[in-house]
Image (cartoon, rainbow, N blue to C red):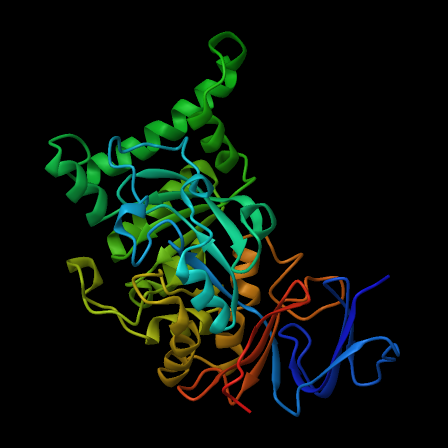
Amino acid sequence: MKKTKAIIHGNVYTIKNGIIENGTVLIEDGKIAAVGTDIAVPAEAEIIDAGGAIVSPGLIDAHTHMGIEEEIHPEGEDTNEMTEPITAELRAIDGINPFDIGYKDAVKAGVTSVMVAMGSANVIGGLACAMKTNGRDLSDMVLKEEAGLKMAFGENPKRVYTEQKKAPTTRMATMALARQAFYDAKTYERKKEEDGFDLANEHILKALKREIPVRLHAHRADDILSAIRLKNEFDLEMVIEHVTDGHLIVEQLKDAGVAAAVGPSLSNRAKVEMENVTFATAGILAKAGIKVALITDHPCTPIAYLPMCAGLAIKHGMTEEDAWKAVTINPAEMLHIDNRVGSIECGKDADIVIWQGYPFTIAGAPKMVLVNGEIAYKNVEQR
């Protein structure tokens, strides 16, 4: 027998098809079955009355270290394998603790999907993954085990390996190691039958074949432009992560056809390369037609502040429509999970938030959060 729910009397922010006032979202067996104002609700459906509140898809954070960089359990620190600058064989999923308290914080904030990556110590860190923030364990939380090849340019690899007295100690060496790794993977593909299987090269080949995007950590303008050169040399699909100086090189980013995961902007100038951090970056890039996601880099900025980051981006010039896209459909598309999440559409997972107040203000908060059509959080303190 089907499990049926109907969210009624909601101002439904579909994201891709406008706002439906006094709308209904029909859910069957964890999927969105119908959306609109004239929906036939089965008699057996569980009714959830939104009472005129905003009903949106669950928010998505396209760049976190959730469950791999634990906030209150330092012995659970698995963010960086700082032993070699190229560790493409690694997978973030193998270091994630799905019971990290950050996942509960995410659900309570209306964030229902995240990308989890290893850190930025290495030039090539390995494979990131995309997952839900609620579920029994990784087996039913993971949306995509291989959501991108994590890379990093700039200060972090230099700092880590200068301390170890081996390359890369300069940006020149960082780029050389990256290029060599991609050329080695091409050679490996040609000689695979005689030389045997190699996990690191297999992961790099996924990026070379555009099966997954490269997710490249770069703050400063020169590092972003180096990333674009790498993209062009190997014809990569690329998302630039952080993009702190993005507003200084808008035309170059647009011409390159890269996406931008912007943040953490709710942060101090923690490093030299973050000198130009501003909440204006996201809006400037979006206005230029660049696909933008807003990110917390949790736990750098706690995941619970993703809605606030959207509000601050709006305050600094981003349109409301672009801000909604930046925490829903845009990150879903960057992660190649938009067939399941990121908007309220028939056939997608019923990851839905009913809000108390406007989400992108300090007073805004979820009243109820559904993941896969099941109530994951209900705020009993709010009415």
Indicate left or right for 169 with 49 as reference.
Answer: left
**Which residue is located at x 66 percent, y 58 percent?**
340
- Quarter of the image with the C terminus in it: bottom right
> Would residue 257 be seen by someone viewing this image from the given angle?
no
> Would residue 87 be seen by someone viewing this image from the given angle?
yes
Q: Quadrant of residue 341?
A: bottom right
Counting every numbered tag in the picture gives 0
- Quarter of the image with the N terminus in it: bottom right
Residue 287 higher or lower than 241, as above or below: below
Could you tell me residue 177's position as x and y percent? 28, 31
Could you tell me residue 141's position as x and y percent? 57, 52
Indicate left or right for 341 with 162 as reference.
Answer: right
**Which residue is located at x 34 percent, y 32 percent?**
87
Could you tell me residue 251's position as x and y percent? 38, 63
Residue 47 higher or lower than 338, as above or below: below
Residue lying furthest top: 194
Q: Quadrant of residue 27?
A: bottom right
Could you tell me residue 227's position as x and y percent? 34, 47
**Which residue is located at x 33 percent, y 27 percent?**
180
Residue 256 higher or lower than 55, as above or below: above
- Nearest to the observer: residue 29 or residue 227: 29
**Which residue is located at x 46 percent, y 19 percent?**
188
- Nearest to the observer: residue 87 or residue 79: 79
- Nearest to the observer: residue 197 or residue 301: 301
